[in-house]
């Protein structure tokens, strides 16, 4: 897509947003539990409403998913047939990408530059990746005795429930919906209450692309109402989730209290970005470290939120980083000039400021930002914030902020760097900056995380898995490995 102009964006942003409904069995329905107001973080004003799905609505959506699965219309369609439909869906996402990006920005506050790249662009690529993969996934023949033929089939699991967060709803939604549908499952999706709109539009496009009614259903509403009903369902086979640790814990409880559905959790992070004095280019590393934490106002699961810097270059590095961050404009996320958009909600903003206040009480020093940013639109914004002198026992070191707040801690040597990097309950991502090849490999081995970036931060691709260790979760999105979540193995043991 050609880069959009500001006036194209403004025109789309001026359009009213219709009220969101539930998609159940191919029908758009009101929610039995009323509606939820959607506030735009850009200005704090009501953008539209979405339907609130009751327990009965959720049960209807799960029943529709089950019936569509049992019908075989999608689940037993030749993989090449599902591939064609998912490619059509990717085409439609691309065709509507500017509309989707602008709608998403109005809903969740991500800056338009990032939304264009990370939301429709990425989601279309993910649908294409799994469309292409699915007719290349084979079963196996086991090496048994000569008198036996043992076939290992891969089958769709049945009904998949997906619950997703408000940051990057389209991208993260696609990471789950695309492999689940490609493998032949039926899906019930529960978007976050503060970021449902682009996923409702995706559902509309899925119907247009030819996904049969009932195969992809969307129920909107609060986590404690709609999400809980879905997670407690007795007829969901697999629950895939991206969100916070506390919600992840609840989902495991719900699974235990209901039908022991399998739960795959992608949770939060407090990712260390480790800078050695021998980094190839300290200025470039400082610029990348600023982007690693401040892009999308810090609302990125893999954000490099703990900066560990070798003591000999600590002061130099912190001033390079602060200078770089100070040049990142905070503002209306619909403006092409903005690099740091809105914080998703007032609750989130107040939480971010609370972390900064606690860090100062603990003895941390603010070297940049620390306050709410005032933007002419109103809404919820925060200055990029850098706090030095943060120690492993401090709250800012241990807990995920999910906002534009960087904790900085010095280290003396490689052994201390590994110790500090691993001094966390999380293990999602990490970065290491060094020109020493041996040290780079030792650090990759030593840091417990799902991904360790070396001399860069945050690169990703559909071909590599994303997931965490420790309390960052237990599942992987993306790559062919994700298909394991959406397929069951079945053995046929045949006496010859
Ligand atoms: P959240 O846990 O508050 O909400 C996530 C989803 O769960 C929402 O749809 C919400 O409505 C639903 N939910 C909330 N309570 C529920 C309940 N009791 N039962 C069922 N559903 C419930 O998380 P969030 O604030 O939307 O997202 C931010 C979090 O997501 C951060 O911790 C971030 O690190 C994490 N995240 C992780 C990844 C990853 O790949 N590991 C990616 C993005 C975000």
Image (cartoon, rainbow, N blue to C red):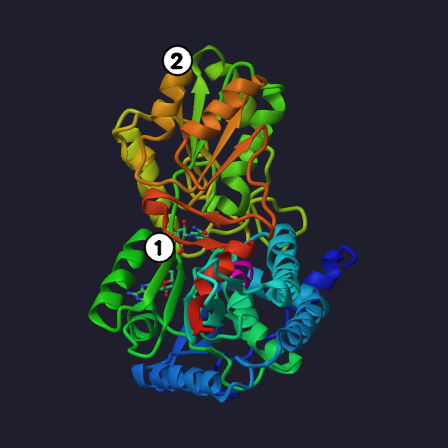
Label 2, ligand 1: CB separation under 8 Å: no
Taking the image as shown, residue 207 lies to the left or right of residue 364, namely right
Q: Could you tell me which quadrant the N terminus lies in? A: bottom right
Instruction: Specify few, some or many for label 2: CA neighbours under 10 Å numbering under 14, 14-19, or 20 or more.
Output: few
Label 2 or label 1, whichever comes before in sequence order: 1
Q: Quadrant of ligand 1?
A: bottom left
Q: Position of residue 302 (x, y in %)?
A: 47, 43
352 to the left or right of 430:
left
Nearer the observer: mark 2 or 1; the answer is: 2
Magenta stretch bounds: 171-175
Q: Is residue 179 above or below residue 328?
A: below
Query: In which quarter of the view is residue 370 placed?
Result: top left
Q: Nearer the viewer, residue 74 or 309?
A: 74
| C-alpha separation, residue under disc 2 versus residue under disc 1 | 38 Å
What residue appears at the point 49 percent right and 49 percent down from the top-left corner? 466
Secondary structure under badge 1?
A: helix
Residue 36 vertical position relative to residue 111 in the rendered view, above or below? below
Mark 2, residue position: 412
- In the image, taking residue 72 as reference, residue 132 lies left or right, namely right
Magenta-colored stretch includes residue 197 = no
Q: Examine the image and state in which quarter residue 16 appears.
A: bottom right
What numbered label is drawn on residue 347? 1
Where residue 306 sits in the image (x, y, percent)?
Answer: 41, 32
Question: Observer-nearest residue: 38 or 231?
Answer: 231
What kind of element bears circle 2?
Answer: loop
């Amino acid at each position: 897509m050609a880069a959009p102009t500001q006036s194209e964006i403004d025109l789309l942003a001026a359009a009213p947003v219709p009220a969101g409904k539930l998609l159940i069995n191919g029908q758009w329905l009101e929610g039995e539990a009323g509606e939820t107001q959607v506030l735009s973080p850009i200005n704090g004003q009501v953008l539209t409403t979405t339907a609130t799905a009751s327990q009965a609505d959720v049960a209807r959506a799960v029943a529709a998913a089950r019936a569509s699965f049992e019908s075989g219309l999608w689940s037993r369609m030749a993989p090449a047939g599902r591939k064609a439909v998912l490619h059509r869906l990717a085409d439609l996402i691309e065709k509507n990408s500017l509309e989707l990006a602008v709608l998403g920005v109005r809903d969740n506050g991500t800056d338009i530059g990032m939304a264009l790249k990370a939301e429709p662009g990425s989601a279309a690529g993910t649908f294409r990746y799994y469309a292409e993969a699915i007719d290349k996934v084979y079963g196996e023949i086991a090496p048994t005795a000569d008198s036996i033929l043992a076939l290992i089939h891969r089958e769709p699991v049945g009904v998949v429930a997906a619950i997703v967060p408000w940051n990057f709803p389209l991208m993260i939604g696609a990471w789950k919906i695309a492999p689940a549908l490609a493998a032949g499952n039926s899906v019930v999706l529960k978007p976050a209450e503060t970021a449902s709109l682009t996923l409702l539009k995706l559902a509309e496009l899925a119907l247009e692309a030819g996904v049969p009614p009932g195969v992809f259903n969307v129920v909107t509403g609060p986590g404690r109402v709609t999400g809980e009903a879905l997670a407690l369902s007795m007829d969901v086979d697999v629950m895939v989730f991206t969100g916070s640790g506390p919600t992840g814990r609840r989902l495991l409880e719900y699974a235990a209290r209901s039908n022991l559905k399998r739960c795959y959790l992608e949770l939060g992070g407090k990712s260390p970005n480790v800078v050695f004095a021998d980094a190839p280019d300290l200025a470039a590393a400082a610029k990348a470290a600023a982007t690693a934490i401040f892009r999308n106002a810090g609302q990125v699961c893999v954000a490099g939120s703990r900066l560990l810097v070798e003591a000999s270059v600590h002061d130099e590095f912190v001033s390079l980083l602060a200078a770089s961050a100070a040049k990142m404009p905070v503002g209306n996320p619909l403006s092409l000039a903005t690099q740091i958009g809105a914080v998703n909600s007032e609750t989130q903003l107040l939480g971010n400021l609370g972390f900064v206040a606690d860090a100062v009480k603990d003895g941390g020093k603010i070297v940049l930002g620390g306050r709410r940013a005032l933007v002419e639109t109103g809404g919820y914004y925060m200055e990029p914030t850098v706090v030095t002198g943060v120690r492993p026992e401090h709250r800012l070191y241990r807990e995920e902020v999910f906002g534009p707040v960087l904790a900085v801690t010095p280290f003396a040597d490689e052994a201390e760097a590994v110790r500090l990097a691993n001094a966390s309950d999380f293990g999602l991502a990490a970065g290491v900056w060094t020109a020493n090849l041996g040290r780079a490999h030792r650090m990759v081995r030593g840091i417990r995380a799902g991904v360790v970036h070396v001399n860069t931060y945050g690169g990703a691709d559909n071909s590599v898995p994303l997931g965490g260790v420790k309390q960052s979760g237990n599942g992987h999105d993306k790559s062919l490995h994700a298909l394991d979540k959406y397929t069951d193995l079945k053995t046929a043991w045949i006496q010859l």
